[in-house]
Amino acid sequence: MPVESLFPRLEPLLPSVQKPIQYVGGELNSQLKDWDEAEVRWALMYPDAYEVGQPNQGVQILYEILNERDGVLAERTYSVWPDMEAVMREHGIPQFTVDAHRPVAAFDVFGVSFSTELGYTNLLTALDLAGIPLEAADRTDDHPIVIAGGHAAFNPEPIADFLDAAVLGDGEEIVLAITEVIREWKDEGEPGGRDGLLLRLAASGGVYVPRFYDVTYLPDGRIQRVAPNRPGVPWRIEKHTVMDLDQWPYPKKPLVPLAETVHERYSVEIFRGCTRGCRFCQAGMITRPVRERSITTIGNMVEQGLKESGFQEVGLLSLSSADHSEIGDIARGLADRYEGTNTSLSLPSTRVDAFNITLAGEFSRGGRRSGLTFAPEGGSERMRKVINKMVTEDDLIRTVSTAYENGWRQVKLYFMCGLPTEEDEDVLAIADMARRVIAAGREATGRKDIRCTVSIGGFVPKPHTPFQWAAQCDHETVDRRLHALKDALRGDKEYGRAIGLRYHDGKPSIIEGLLSRGDRRVGKVVRAVWADGGRFDGWSEHFSYERWTVCAEKAFADEPVDLAWYTVRERDEVEVLPWDHLDAGLDREWLWQDWQDAIDETEVEDCRWTPCYDCGVCPTMGTEIQIGPTGRKLLPLSVV
Amino acid sequence: MPEGPAPAPVTQRLRVRYAKRGRLRFTSHRDISRAVERAVRRAGIPVAFSGGFTPHPKISYAGAAATGVASEAEYLEIGLTETRDPARVRADLDAALPPGLDIVDVVPVGTGRGDAAAKPGAFTDRLEASEWRIRLDGVAESDAAAAVAAFMAAAIIEVERLTKKGRRRFDVRAAVSACELDRRAAEAADAPCAILRMVVRHSTPAVRPDDILTGLRQVADLAPPSPPLVTRLAQGPLDADTGGLADPLDPDRETGLPSGDDAGTAHGHERPRPGDTASADAVSA
């Protein structure tokens, strides 16, 4: 059945909305495939505004992989701003894709990638605009299968009622596997209807169908048990791990936006996973083991990506980019290759390490000098031991001194507030550290115009980390410590004016905490907040803490739980956690031991260069660490 | 950190006429400038860069049609570090841009000989006026005709608009040297509509098509039921005798350098004229 473009109806309305170009599509390297020739059709969504969602690597990679297949079609959709939502509701225009402006409800699968829990209300807006019933239980055979992925999908329980399925881990292989299951099911005449398809997906062990699991609770509110409610459904659902990144060199043809977006560069993931073992870091825990992309693949991807896009900047992404075993050769090779072409290279997520200054020097050779950012995360030595961020203050001072000596005038330092066991003095120690940084910079250069910016955010305990059992710090305490830090910096006559402070208040972190460690009962809160107008919770101008607390109070009125129970309450070892049936590969006993080590201020080394400490991932998932060096070199490009 | 070498000097300057068409009329000026920078890189055009810590490509724009307004005649100038065949640049740049941002004409700027054309600002001075087409869907021809007659009969029509300098009140009538209905185009359109064509002098504050629509509403209660579709058809020097617009690139062509537009091909004489449109919804005067 032909599905018509909504664009003719949309076009006359575009002059009345902000930044209409974001709804127009037509980006370089976007694809339009024939609807009728496709057997399986995916609508992919990043549930935030286009300017944030368009650069998302995950969605771009899946879009390209799916569209490369015959008989498979993928289009993209993003959250529309409230002005556009109002216009669409007034004129009866459903949620549409930006590629061919087809209605999302016409697709077979609606796949939504959640990097953060703050996109949950936006999921509901999109479902509602699409005309898809919000609750999975109300959907019929005519509606798409709604699947969540991304890091937040490692605990999808707060939105379990709204999802048909969730997928954990790397998406490259599983989207194709799901596509095959759907294709077969359709070929066979869709036996068993919607449930028949979901059962096939669930039986594979790699797709979580929340509706096939019952959750029972103890009288005090804790979970008693999560169990499959029908045969053929596994007790635990495993995450997916792509073992050879060189086999998946995506994006090959990056989407180039016309509208302005948050990251306009060609990004290559140089490795996936991280074993530094920072205890607060969910990404580092759920993406293990470390798998490097080879220097030659990286070189080829950068060459092709720049040629296809015209971007002026290359980002080498990973969770700790300077840890690639051949990063020095990669940096030098790329800097040599693009010298004189005004192509800038950036290396986000670097550790506090003097070596990184050398790297940064290489990177600024070819064009613009990017800023230097380091993340000590904790202000005091004690705090950094608790979170296992193994960097001493002397390391930091040495590193920034080198940076200032090499011509940088400003560095940025990232910290968190509200970490487990944190006291006021741990946060105040950030001020001391910042003063030492400025003093070291002045001494190294003899100049007065040395600056540093301290950026600090509230800590949120995340599932599948050693801090999953921790009590989140209440927002009053976080705010009090941040104000004390601000006063300490502002009152400093000698250094205060050289130090900038950027921080957010602690309230949004509490809601993020509710959504991160919540269970299925939290779904009622999400729905109530959305119904009350909650949208774009990741944007401070849209977020309303009051709305969330009022809705939580109402939704939990008849439950033995409340907002504080989900957030500032410490859990004990035996409590069933809402995500215990979702397997990130991490051994629960190891996580608990690491939590105890945190309290004891005991550090753990990186398993890439010390013996295995049995986190459990490799044996459970049948994976292993894959690192170089390969000994190969990046070849310079021949001049055409 | 070592300072980089001095940027390579500009050896050739090209003036480029481009169009923004169809759904790409929703691009803003900033969107276009990013798209052009990337297209230049993809096309391998040796653009010159400024010096300093954040080098910028030497591409400058002569005004820009507003977001949502289509145009057949926008202009930019680009500095190259090596001399290139303008016809080749036209084809390569056009291929590297997304469909809807289209390169219409490329002409080298005369250099040496103290050519006035090469002085900064000289080119924008040539853009004395714009020719606009405004399609008003759902507006009856008789209503539009009456409004245009009332508008042209008035001596002064003051409208108010929020400008960067705050709320301002200014005359829109004086800037309009011609305004008439394009009946043939309206008859050929896919839906009932009235189509206006007008020549508007560039002035300060700028009199924009929406200011003229405000004026039409004031003098004749003309209130289109849906947003007007506005297209700039041409920009250039205003011919006092004919009331038409000349091609602002003609003075550059007259320097004797090879023309960028299909020069040397069988269609060498068919370079675009102001008012010509290459888009599918082109109307003839």
Image (cartoon, rainbow, N blue to C red):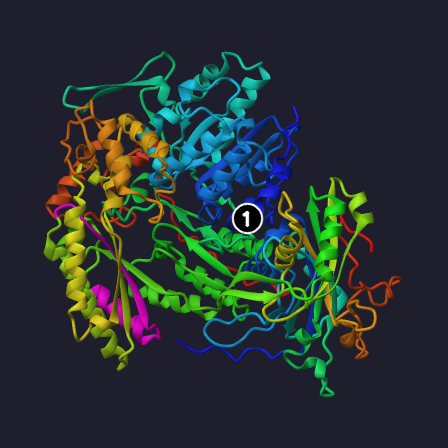
Residue A492 part of the magenta segment: no
Residue linked to disc 1: A20
Report x, y in % for residue A149: 41, 34
Q: On screen, B245 above or below A300?
A: below
Residue A400 part of the magenta segment: yes
Q: Residue at 21% across / 58% down in the picture?
A: A391
Report x, y in % for residue A94: 53, 32
Image quarter of the N terminus of chain B:
bottom left
Using the rendered image of the protein, determine whether residue A399 is visible from the camera's viewpoint: yes
**A167 to the left or right of A69:** left
**A28 to the left or right of B267:** left
Using the rendered image of the protein, determine whether residue A252 is visible from the camera's viewpoint: no
Q: Residue at 35% across / 12% down in the picture?
A: A230
Over which residues does the magenta segment extend?
A395-421
Amino acid identity at mark 1: Pro
Quadrant for residue A213, please give it: top left
Q: Residue at 47% across / 76% down in the picture?
A: B52
Report x, y in % for residue B26: 60, 51
Of all chains, the one bearing label 1 is: A
